[in-house]
Amino acid sequence: MGIFRKMLKHGEAKLSAALNKNDNAAPPKSDKPPTRWEKAIVALHGIVAQVSQIDPDGVDVFCFPGTKGNEGSDVYRNIKDMKGLEALVNSKAEPSGACHMGQAMETVLQEALDRGFDKRPCCILVLTAGRPDDHEALSKTLADTATKVTKAGDLSVTFVHIGDDEWAEQYLKHLDDDLTTTSANGEVIDIVDTIKDEDIQKAVGEIKKEGALGKGGGGALIGAFAGAAMGAGGMYLFNKINAKKRTEGWNGTWRVTFDGNEVSVVSVKDDLDGNLTITGWPDEATSTGQYAENDEGGFNIQQMQSNEPEPIYGTIEDEHTISWSDGTRWDEVPPEGVHWTKYAGAAAAGAAASGAAGYLMQKKFFNKASNKEPCDYVIVLDRSQMMAVTDAGK
């Protein structure tokens, strides 16, 4: 069973308990805590769900194996939705071997330089667990690339440390602090920043507090951080908390998109007792849905279609956006005279002001993504043995 199928089963059990008015029932727990790889896959899922909406070409995902050289590195181009993403990155190999990141990063950076930055910047995110065995080569590649960038903001690399490996922490601090250069016009170019495991844990601590998402801003990207810290449980936690301010039900008109293309506009009627009537999807049919508020103050939500044998589960990204397990995305159509962006702007301002979640949102990759800046977004995923580790007590 895949990581996300486990997550959906987890949500299904909790939803059933809530609908049966047994909201104090504890959600099922897996026998083992998630590995770093499982955390990374859940984080990847949440991040791709967001940035694929603003990268016109879709997201490129590079998985580098624990072997020397570029042989066997897997590249997945133009990812525009999450459907089948987990199976894709797990299709060839499990995490194993030493961490050789240098060649993969050299390829990613050279492609960025070859494309140039006239149309849009390039933002690279690296999800990794350990100090690369070829760390000297990687440092040189990053330093050499920085000298070829002429304007701050054209190219950035954000390293996210998943796990508590001390050597990795020290190395990433070196990258963050020491790799700067000066352009011909005197502008300081700093293409690298890093996010420590400690930073992620602090942000998750905020997520667990009532109202933390509203204060911290960043929406589902913060949920992706929860995934990086907790695996499927983190995204489930985020799904429950995020919509707690939705106090007037889910009534309204929603635009349905798949692979970035609009496929329908649906009308939703909410009886305010947990039942939805959905008109216009699929095709012109009428389907039903259910949602339940739970003890954490958020919602689980699902829909049932006549042509589908199992429920379709929703991930509530914010008050006006739901991503569904069938690969569709629903965005609420604002009533006349209402602009969601005004509220999104207020949330972004909150993120910039304070808090661990706000601090993470200022990192290069997430800052551009949370502000919906069109970029070439690239994700580099460590598939070395270090990613198969389960961190004690986490």
Image (spheres, grey):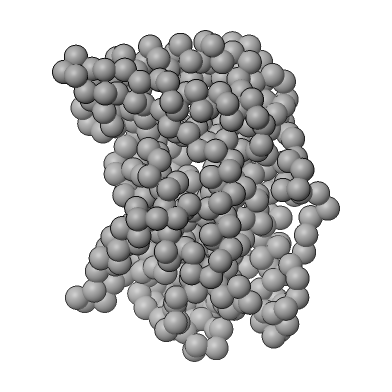
Instruction: Give the image location of residue 326, x and y in percent.
Output: 54, 57
Does residue 27 appear to the left or right of 244 in the view shown?
right
Q: Residue at x 46, y 11 (%)?
A: 140
Location of residue 280 with respect to 230 vertically, above or below: below
Question: 369 or 309, which lies in front?
Answer: 369
Does residue 31 appear to the left or right of 367 in the view shown?
right
Q: Which residue is drawn at 29% across and 14% down?
A: 148
Instruction: Give the image location of residue 174, x and y in percent.
Output: 50, 23
* Residue 98 shows in the view: yes
Does residue 81 appear to the left or right of 24 in the view shown?
left
Q: Which residue is drawn at 48% across and 69% down?
A: 211
Instruction: Give the image location of residue 66, x and y in percent.
Output: 67, 20
Q: In which quarter of the image is residue 267?
A: bottom left
Residue furthest to the right: 31
Q: Residue at x 69, y 85 (%)?
A: 21
Location of residue 260 with respect to 105 vertically, above or below: below
Location of residue 56 with respect to 136 vertically, above or below: below
Residue furthest to the left: 185
Question: 115 or 125, which lies in front?
Answer: 125
Does residue 68 appear to the left or right of 343 in the view shown?
right
Instruction: Give the image location of residue 167, x and y in percent.
Output: 64, 25
* Residue 264 shows in the view: no
